Amino acid sequence: MAVLEQSGNTPGMVVQLNEKRKGESLWVESWRRLRRNKAAVVGGIIILLNLLVSIFAPVIALKPYDKQVLVDNNAAPEWVTKVFPNMKPREEGGYVTVNNSYPLGADQLGRDMFSRIVYGTRVSLTVAFVGPLVSILIGTTVGLIAGYFGGILDNLLMRLVEIMYAFPTLLFIILLMTFFRTSFANPEAGTLAYTLGQIDLASGGMLFIFIGIGLTSWMQMARLVRGQVLSVREQEYIEAAHAMGAQTGRVMFGHILPNILGPLIVAETLTIPTYISYEAFLSFIGLGVNPPTPSWGSMIAEGSRTISSYPNQAIFPALALFLIMFAFNFLGDGLRDALDPRMRGVD
Protein backbone atom coordinates (compact mmCIF):
# COMPACT_ATOMS: atom_id res chain seq x y z
CA MET A 1 0.00 0.00 0.00
CA ALA A 2 1.28 3.49 -0.77
CA VAL A 3 2.23 5.70 2.23
CA LEU A 4 1.53 9.44 2.18
CA GLU A 5 3.97 11.79 3.96
CA GLN A 6 3.78 15.55 4.67
CA SER A 7 6.95 17.63 4.18
CA GLY A 8 7.71 20.22 6.87
CA ASN A 9 10.07 22.37 4.79
CA THR A 10 7.52 23.82 2.42
CA PRO A 11 4.22 25.53 3.08
CA GLY A 12 1.14 23.52 2.48
CA MET A 13 1.10 19.81 2.05
CA VAL A 14 3.42 17.88 -0.22
CA VAL A 15 2.39 14.33 -0.88
CA GLN A 16 5.10 11.80 -1.60
CA LEU A 17 4.47 8.30 -2.86
CA ASN A 18 6.91 5.97 -1.09
CA GLU A 19 5.81 2.87 -2.93
CA LYS A 20 4.89 2.64 -6.55
CA ARG A 21 2.50 0.03 -7.80
CA LYS A 22 3.90 -1.78 -10.78
CA GLY A 23 1.50 -1.86 -13.69
CA GLU A 24 0.37 -5.18 -15.13
CA SER A 25 0.41 -6.02 -18.81
CA LEU A 26 -2.67 -7.35 -20.53
CA TRP A 27 -1.14 -10.84 -20.69
CA VAL A 28 -0.32 -10.91 -16.98
CA GLU A 29 -3.79 -9.74 -16.05
CA SER A 30 -5.34 -12.23 -18.47
CA TRP A 31 -3.35 -15.06 -16.89
CA ARG A 32 -4.59 -14.01 -13.46
CA ARG A 33 -8.21 -14.02 -14.65
CA LEU A 34 -7.72 -17.37 -16.32
CA ARG A 35 -6.46 -18.94 -13.10
CA ARG A 36 -9.59 -17.75 -11.32
CA ASN A 37 -11.81 -19.55 -13.84
CA LYS A 38 -12.29 -22.96 -12.22
CA ALA A 39 -13.77 -24.60 -15.31
CA ALA A 40 -10.83 -23.44 -17.45
CA VAL A 41 -8.35 -24.66 -14.82
CA VAL A 42 -10.04 -28.08 -14.71
CA GLY A 43 -9.97 -28.22 -18.51
CA GLY A 44 -6.29 -27.31 -18.56
CA ILE A 45 -5.50 -30.01 -15.98
CA ILE A 46 -7.35 -32.65 -18.02
CA ILE A 47 -5.46 -31.60 -21.16
CA LEU A 48 -2.15 -31.69 -19.31
CA LEU A 49 -2.90 -35.16 -17.92
CA ASN A 50 -3.79 -36.43 -21.39
CA LEU A 51 -0.59 -34.91 -22.74
CA LEU A 52 1.45 -36.74 -20.09
CA VAL A 53 -0.42 -39.97 -20.86
CA SER A 54 0.38 -39.64 -24.56
CA ILE A 55 4.05 -38.97 -23.88
CA PHE A 56 4.48 -41.83 -21.41
CA ALA A 57 2.08 -44.23 -23.14
CA PRO A 58 4.65 -47.08 -23.35
CA VAL A 59 5.11 -46.85 -19.58
CA ILE A 60 1.44 -46.44 -18.64
CA ALA A 61 0.02 -49.07 -21.01
CA LEU A 62 -0.12 -52.50 -19.43
CA LYS A 63 0.16 -54.41 -22.70
CA PRO A 64 1.11 -53.66 -26.33
CA TYR A 65 -1.88 -52.03 -27.99
CA ASP A 66 -1.77 -54.49 -30.92
CA LYS A 67 -1.20 -57.70 -28.95
CA GLN A 68 -3.99 -60.20 -29.57
CA VAL A 69 -4.92 -62.92 -27.11
CA LEU A 70 -7.84 -64.59 -28.83
CA VAL A 71 -8.76 -66.76 -25.85
CA ASP A 72 -9.44 -63.53 -23.90
CA ASN A 73 -11.64 -61.90 -26.52
CA ASN A 74 -14.46 -59.83 -25.00
CA ALA A 75 -13.15 -60.51 -21.50
CA ALA A 76 -14.04 -58.01 -18.78
CA PRO A 77 -12.93 -57.38 -15.19
CA GLU A 78 -15.32 -58.11 -12.35
CA TRP A 79 -16.09 -54.47 -11.59
CA VAL A 80 -17.31 -53.88 -15.16
CA THR A 81 -19.83 -56.71 -14.85
CA LYS A 82 -21.20 -54.99 -11.76
CA VAL A 83 -21.47 -51.60 -13.46
CA PHE A 84 -23.28 -53.13 -16.45
CA PRO A 85 -25.80 -55.64 -15.03
CA ASN A 86 -26.55 -57.17 -18.45
CA MET A 87 -22.92 -58.39 -18.62
CA LYS A 88 -23.51 -61.51 -16.56
CA PRO A 89 -20.37 -63.62 -15.82
CA ARG A 90 -20.23 -67.22 -17.00
CA GLU A 91 -19.84 -68.37 -13.41
CA GLU A 92 -23.34 -67.02 -12.79
CA GLY A 93 -24.83 -68.54 -15.91
CA GLY A 94 -24.03 -65.62 -18.22
CA TYR A 95 -21.77 -65.16 -21.22
CA VAL A 96 -18.95 -62.84 -20.06
CA THR A 97 -15.46 -64.16 -19.36
CA VAL A 98 -14.18 -62.47 -16.21
CA ASN A 99 -10.49 -61.55 -16.38
CA ASN A 100 -9.19 -58.94 -13.96
CA SER A 101 -5.87 -58.57 -15.82
CA TYR A 102 -7.71 -56.23 -18.23
CA PRO A 103 -8.64 -53.07 -16.26
CA LEU A 104 -11.30 -51.98 -18.80
CA GLY A 105 -11.77 -55.27 -20.59
CA ALA A 106 -10.60 -56.73 -23.88
CA ASP A 107 -12.06 -56.18 -27.35
CA GLN A 108 -13.28 -58.83 -29.78
CA LEU A 109 -9.69 -59.62 -30.80
CA GLY A 110 -8.42 -59.96 -27.24
CA ARG A 111 -6.57 -56.62 -27.19
CA ASP A 112 -6.34 -54.67 -23.95
CA MET A 113 -8.76 -51.74 -24.14
CA PHE A 114 -6.98 -49.71 -21.49
CA SER A 115 -3.72 -49.81 -23.45
CA ARG A 116 -5.50 -48.93 -26.69
CA ILE A 117 -7.25 -45.96 -25.06
CA VAL A 118 -3.91 -44.76 -23.68
CA TYR A 119 -2.27 -44.92 -27.12
CA GLY A 120 -5.37 -43.40 -28.70
CA THR A 121 -4.60 -40.26 -26.72
CA ARG A 122 -1.62 -39.70 -29.03
CA VAL A 123 -3.82 -39.59 -32.13
CA SER A 124 -6.38 -37.15 -30.71
CA LEU A 125 -3.82 -34.79 -29.18
CA THR A 126 -1.66 -34.82 -32.31
CA VAL A 127 -4.68 -33.75 -34.35
CA ALA A 128 -5.53 -31.20 -31.64
CA PHE A 129 -2.16 -29.50 -32.06
CA VAL A 130 -1.41 -30.04 -35.76
CA GLY A 131 -4.83 -28.76 -36.89
CA PRO A 132 -4.47 -25.32 -35.24
CA LEU A 133 -0.83 -25.11 -36.34
CA VAL A 134 -1.76 -25.52 -40.02
CA SER A 135 -4.75 -23.23 -39.60
CA ILE A 136 -2.65 -20.48 -38.02
CA LEU A 137 0.21 -20.74 -40.54
CA ILE A 138 -2.01 -20.64 -43.64
CA GLY A 139 -5.00 -18.69 -42.38
CA THR A 140 -2.99 -15.98 -40.65
CA THR A 141 -0.79 -15.43 -43.72
CA VAL A 142 -3.75 -15.23 -46.10
CA GLY A 143 -5.76 -13.02 -43.74
CA LEU A 144 -2.86 -10.63 -43.12
CA ILE A 145 -2.16 -10.22 -46.83
CA ALA A 146 -5.83 -9.76 -47.72
CA GLY A 147 -6.60 -7.33 -44.91
CA TYR A 148 -3.42 -5.27 -45.15
CA PHE A 149 -3.13 -4.80 -48.91
CA GLY A 150 -6.84 -4.86 -49.77
CA GLY A 151 -7.97 -4.13 -53.32
CA ILE A 152 -7.81 -6.81 -56.00
CA LEU A 153 -5.62 -9.12 -53.92
CA ASP A 154 -8.15 -9.01 -51.09
CA ASN A 155 -11.00 -9.80 -53.49
CA LEU A 156 -9.15 -12.74 -55.06
CA LEU A 157 -8.19 -14.31 -51.74
CA MET A 158 -11.63 -13.87 -50.19
CA ARG A 159 -13.37 -15.29 -53.26
CA LEU A 160 -11.10 -18.33 -52.94
CA VAL A 161 -12.12 -18.69 -49.30
CA GLU A 162 -15.80 -18.38 -50.22
CA ILE A 163 -15.47 -21.03 -52.91
CA MET A 164 -13.96 -23.45 -50.41
CA TYR A 165 -16.64 -22.51 -47.90
CA ALA A 166 -19.25 -23.58 -50.46
CA PHE A 167 -18.37 -27.23 -49.79
CA PRO A 168 -19.60 -28.78 -46.53
CA THR A 169 -16.41 -29.16 -44.50
CA LEU A 170 -16.94 -32.71 -43.31
CA LEU A 171 -18.03 -33.91 -46.75
CA PHE A 172 -15.01 -32.19 -48.30
CA ILE A 173 -12.68 -33.95 -45.83
CA ILE A 174 -14.33 -37.30 -46.60
CA LEU A 175 -13.82 -36.75 -50.34
CA LEU A 176 -10.18 -35.77 -49.75
CA MET A 177 -9.54 -38.83 -47.61
CA THR A 178 -11.19 -41.10 -50.19
CA PHE A 179 -9.01 -39.55 -52.89
CA PHE A 180 -5.85 -40.01 -50.81
CA ARG A 181 -6.62 -43.61 -49.89
CA THR A 182 -7.32 -44.64 -53.48
CA SER A 183 -4.70 -42.56 -55.31
CA PHE A 184 -1.81 -43.45 -53.00
CA ALA A 185 -2.64 -47.14 -52.63
CA ASN A 186 -0.14 -48.56 -55.15
CA PRO A 187 2.12 -45.76 -56.44
CA GLU A 188 5.35 -46.31 -58.33
CA ALA A 189 8.51 -46.39 -56.24
CA GLY A 190 10.49 -43.17 -56.29
CA THR A 191 7.53 -40.87 -56.98
CA LEU A 192 6.14 -38.21 -54.66
CA ALA A 193 2.99 -40.28 -54.22
CA TYR A 194 5.08 -43.24 -53.10
CA THR A 195 6.99 -41.09 -50.59
CA LEU A 196 3.79 -39.64 -49.14
CA GLY A 197 2.29 -43.12 -48.98
CA GLN A 198 5.27 -44.44 -47.04
CA ILE A 199 5.13 -41.51 -44.61
CA ASP A 200 1.43 -42.09 -44.11
CA LEU A 201 2.05 -45.79 -43.55
CA ALA A 202 4.80 -45.09 -41.01
CA SER A 203 2.55 -42.64 -39.13
CA GLY A 204 -0.29 -45.14 -38.91
CA GLY A 205 -2.43 -43.29 -41.45
CA MET A 206 -2.23 -39.92 -39.73
CA LEU A 207 -0.45 -37.96 -42.50
CA PHE A 208 -3.46 -37.85 -44.81
CA ILE A 209 -5.68 -36.94 -41.87
CA PHE A 210 -3.43 -33.95 -41.20
CA ILE A 211 -3.53 -32.96 -44.87
CA GLY A 212 -7.30 -33.37 -45.08
CA ILE A 213 -7.99 -31.33 -41.96
CA GLY A 214 -5.27 -28.80 -42.79
CA LEU A 215 -6.70 -28.08 -46.24
CA THR A 216 -10.08 -27.21 -44.72
CA SER A 217 -9.17 -25.62 -41.39
CA TRP A 218 -7.63 -22.31 -42.46
CA MET A 219 -10.61 -20.56 -44.11
CA GLN A 220 -12.27 -19.43 -40.90
CA MET A 221 -8.94 -18.25 -39.51
CA ALA A 222 -8.25 -16.27 -42.71
CA ARG A 223 -11.56 -14.45 -42.47
CA LEU A 224 -11.07 -13.73 -38.77
CA VAL A 225 -7.54 -12.39 -39.31
CA ARG A 226 -8.67 -10.24 -42.23
CA GLY A 227 -11.42 -8.68 -40.12
CA GLN A 228 -9.02 -7.99 -37.27
CA VAL A 229 -6.46 -6.45 -39.62
CA LEU A 230 -9.08 -4.18 -41.18
CA SER A 231 -10.00 -2.94 -37.71
CA VAL A 232 -6.46 -2.07 -36.63
CA ARG A 233 -4.57 -1.08 -39.78
CA GLU A 234 -5.81 2.52 -39.58
CA GLN A 235 -4.94 2.91 -35.90
CA GLU A 236 -2.56 5.68 -34.83
CA TYR A 237 0.29 3.35 -33.89
CA ILE A 238 0.22 1.78 -37.37
CA GLU A 239 0.35 5.21 -38.99
CA ALA A 240 3.22 6.11 -36.67
CA ALA A 241 5.11 2.99 -37.73
CA HIS A 242 4.67 3.96 -41.39
CA ALA A 243 5.80 7.50 -40.64
CA MET A 244 8.98 6.15 -39.02
CA GLY A 245 9.77 4.21 -42.18
CA ALA A 246 8.92 0.69 -40.98
CA GLN A 247 8.91 -1.91 -43.74
CA THR A 248 5.71 -3.70 -44.71
CA GLY A 249 6.76 -7.01 -43.13
CA ARG A 250 7.72 -5.22 -39.93
CA VAL A 251 4.33 -3.53 -39.74
CA MET A 252 2.39 -6.71 -40.47
CA PHE A 253 4.25 -9.13 -38.22
CA GLY A 254 5.72 -6.74 -35.66
CA HIS A 255 2.83 -4.35 -35.00
CA ILE A 256 -0.44 -5.72 -36.35
CA LEU A 257 -0.11 -9.45 -35.61
CA PRO A 258 0.87 -9.13 -31.91
CA ASN A 259 -2.17 -6.91 -31.30
CA ILE A 260 -4.67 -9.38 -32.77
CA LEU A 261 -3.28 -12.58 -31.24
CA GLY A 262 -5.87 -12.70 -28.44
CA PRO A 263 -8.94 -13.39 -30.63
CA LEU A 264 -6.91 -15.80 -32.78
CA ILE A 265 -5.82 -17.90 -29.79
CA VAL A 266 -9.38 -18.03 -28.46
CA ALA A 267 -10.83 -18.96 -31.86
CA GLU A 268 -8.35 -21.80 -32.44
CA THR A 269 -8.76 -23.18 -28.91
CA LEU A 270 -12.52 -23.32 -29.38
CA THR A 271 -12.05 -25.01 -32.77
CA ILE A 272 -9.77 -27.80 -31.48
CA PRO A 273 -12.74 -30.03 -30.43
CA THR A 274 -13.93 -29.81 -34.04
CA TYR A 275 -10.60 -31.15 -35.31
CA ILE A 276 -10.74 -33.99 -32.78
CA SER A 277 -14.30 -34.84 -33.79
CA TYR A 278 -13.29 -34.89 -37.48
CA GLU A 279 -10.54 -37.41 -36.77
CA ALA A 280 -12.86 -39.53 -34.61
CA PHE A 281 -15.55 -39.51 -37.29
CA LEU A 282 -13.11 -40.40 -40.06
CA SER A 283 -11.80 -43.30 -37.99
CA PHE A 284 -15.36 -44.30 -37.17
CA ILE A 285 -16.26 -44.68 -40.85
CA GLY A 286 -12.95 -46.34 -41.73
CA LEU A 287 -11.17 -43.40 -43.39
CA GLY A 288 -8.97 -42.51 -40.42
CA VAL A 289 -5.92 -44.18 -38.98
CA ASN A 290 -4.75 -47.53 -40.30
CA PRO A 291 -5.35 -50.61 -38.15
CA PRO A 292 -4.05 -51.63 -35.70
CA THR A 293 -3.19 -48.03 -34.74
CA PRO A 294 -5.69 -47.24 -31.97
CA SER A 295 -8.05 -44.31 -32.32
CA TRP A 296 -10.96 -43.54 -30.07
CA GLY A 297 -13.19 -43.17 -33.13
CA SER A 298 -12.31 -46.61 -34.51
CA MET A 299 -12.67 -48.14 -31.03
CA ILE A 300 -16.16 -46.67 -30.74
CA ALA A 301 -17.01 -48.04 -34.18
CA GLU A 302 -15.80 -51.52 -33.22
CA GLY A 303 -17.56 -51.40 -29.87
CA SER A 304 -20.84 -50.18 -31.38
CA ARG A 305 -21.24 -53.51 -33.17
CA THR A 306 -21.51 -55.33 -29.84
CA ILE A 307 -22.80 -52.51 -27.65
CA SER A 308 -25.82 -54.47 -26.46
CA SER A 309 -23.65 -57.35 -25.22
CA TYR A 310 -20.40 -55.54 -24.31
CA PRO A 311 -21.24 -51.84 -23.75
CA ASN A 312 -17.86 -51.19 -22.13
CA GLN A 313 -16.10 -51.54 -25.49
CA ALA A 314 -17.89 -48.44 -26.87
CA ILE A 315 -18.59 -46.43 -23.71
CA PHE A 316 -15.03 -46.21 -22.33
CA PRO A 317 -13.40 -44.76 -25.49
CA ALA A 318 -16.44 -42.51 -25.89
CA LEU A 319 -15.88 -41.18 -22.36
CA ALA A 320 -12.23 -40.48 -23.17
CA LEU A 321 -13.29 -38.57 -26.29
CA PHE A 322 -15.96 -36.72 -24.31
CA LEU A 323 -13.51 -35.60 -21.61
CA ILE A 324 -10.85 -34.25 -23.95
CA MET A 325 -13.37 -32.35 -26.09
CA PHE A 326 -15.05 -30.76 -23.08
CA ALA A 327 -11.65 -29.91 -21.59
CA PHE A 328 -10.72 -27.89 -24.69
CA ASN A 329 -14.16 -26.24 -24.66
CA PHE A 330 -13.75 -25.21 -21.02
CA LEU A 331 -10.24 -23.90 -21.68
CA GLY A 332 -11.41 -22.02 -24.77
CA ASP A 333 -14.26 -20.35 -22.87
CA GLY A 334 -11.83 -19.38 -20.12
CA LEU A 335 -9.36 -17.91 -22.61
CA ARG A 336 -12.14 -15.94 -24.29
CA ASP A 337 -13.09 -14.33 -20.99
CA ALA A 338 -9.48 -13.83 -19.87
CA LEU A 339 -8.31 -12.19 -23.10
CA ASP A 340 -11.37 -9.96 -23.48
CA PRO A 341 -9.96 -6.38 -23.31
CA ARG A 342 -13.31 -5.17 -21.91
CA MET A 343 -12.55 -7.21 -18.77
CA ARG A 344 -9.28 -5.36 -18.14
CA GLY A 345 -9.21 -4.10 -14.57
CA VAL A 346 -12.32 -6.10 -13.63
CA ASP A 347 -11.97 -8.85 -11.02
Image: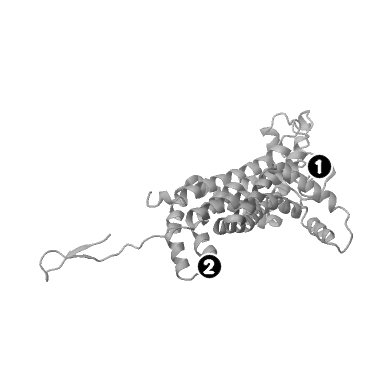
In the visual, does 33 lie left or right of 92? left
Q: CA distance from mark 1 to mark 2?
A: 63 Å
Q: Quadrant of the N terminus?
A: bottom left
- Choose mark 1 or mark 2, whichever is in front: 2
Mark 2 is on which residue type?
Arg
Residue for point 64% across, 45% down:
274
Name the foreground residue: 134 vs 77: 134
Outermost left residue: 11
Q: By what rule are the colours in the image chosen? A: one colour
Report x, y in % for residue 256. 51, 60
Residue lying at the far front in this picture: please name it: 152
Residue 258 lies left or right of residue 140; in this view the side is: left
Crowd around label 2: few <14 · some 14–19 · many ≥20 (10 Å): some
Task: Give residue 299's quadrant in the image.
Answer: top right
Compare residues 329 and 220 and report the one nearer the observer.
Answer: 220
Q: Disc 2 marks which residue?
A: 250
- Secondary structure under badge 2? helix
| Residue at 51% over, 47% down | 40
Q: Nearer the viewer, residue 199 or 19?
A: 199
* Residue 101 visible in the displayed image: no
Residue 300 percent across, percent down from the top left: 73, 40
Q: Quadrant of residue 285?
A: top right
Provide residue 286's location: percent of width, then percent of height.
79, 43
Q: What amino acid is found at the position of numbered circle 1 in the picture?
A: Asp
The dot on residue 129 is none
Q: Secondary structure at mark 1?
A: helix
Residue 72: numbered disc: 1
User: Hey, which quadrant is residue 306 in on the image?
Assistant: top right
Q: Is residue 75 above or below residue 290?
A: above
Q: Residue placed at 66% from the left, 57% from the top?
A: 55
Q: Residues within 10 Å of mark 1 (few under 14, many from 20)?
A: many
